Amino acid sequence: MNKQLKVVLVGLPGSGKSTFGKQLAKEMDFPFLDLDQLIEERYQLKISEIFSIHGEGTFRDWESLVLQDTLKQDRAFILASGGGTPCFNDNMDLINAEAISVYLDVPLGSISRRLQTSKAQQRPLFQGLDQGELTLKLKSLLVSREYFYNQAKIKLSGEDFSAELLLVELISRLKS
């Protein structure tokens, strides 16, 4: 496998980008990076603090800067982007120019259940929402973001995709 291969996972919050990304990175023996963690490390603030102190606009600008710097690195990695990353500041064009993008297209019901049982309240876009409101918010996000997600080079749909399935797809893309 190409040692400079960069894979960027995109999809809604709760679609499994971090969980699947760690599995894929282990399978490929590549470093795993999480864009939100990189942002928090650079700016020494939690994502929720950036949103509350500086607003979403500043967050999106900082997110784009960290994404650009990460994609410039001369090494292979698996990167879990934030759910909104591809939708702002031409980030999807940048991702597709510098990496293989993979859209994790998971059913909304599955995502809603995952977020309800996880720490959804720590995510700025979902704070204070009950289950019904959470599902409506996810539907709204999908409508506004799916155009960008569908620009990904690879789309994995369903709930049970595997690192092995994606590896087969990546190998065939690298050969062509």
Image: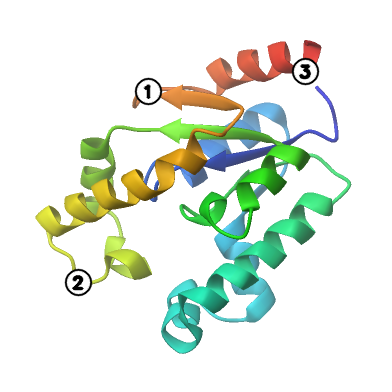
The amino acid type of the residue labelled 1 equals: Asp
Q: Quadrant of residue 166?
A: top right
Q: Which of pointers 2 and 1 indicates the residue nearer the eye? A: 2
Tell me what residue is drawn at x 50 percent, y 25 percent. Answer: 155
The N terminus appears in which quarter of the rendering? top right
Residue 136 placement, left or right of 175: left
Question: Mark 3 and mark 1: span between their CA atoms?
Answer: 24 Å
Is mark 3 in CB contact (under 8 Å) with mark 2?
no
Label 1, secondary structure: give it: loop
Q: Which of pointers 3 and 1 indicates the residue nearer the eye? A: 3
Q: Is residue 133 above or below residue 139?
A: below
Q: In this view, does 113 lie above or below 49?
A: above
Question: Mark 2 and mark 1: span between their CA atoms?
Answer: 29 Å
Name the residue that disc number 1 marks. Answer: 160
The C terminus appears in which quarter of the rendering? top right
Name the residue that disc number 3 marks. Answer: 174
Closer to the N terminus: mark 2 or mark 1? 2
Name the residue that disc number 2 marks. Answer: 128
Tell me what residue is drawn at x 37 percent, y 23 percent. Answer: 160
Coordinates of residue 149 in the picture (x, y in percent):
49, 39
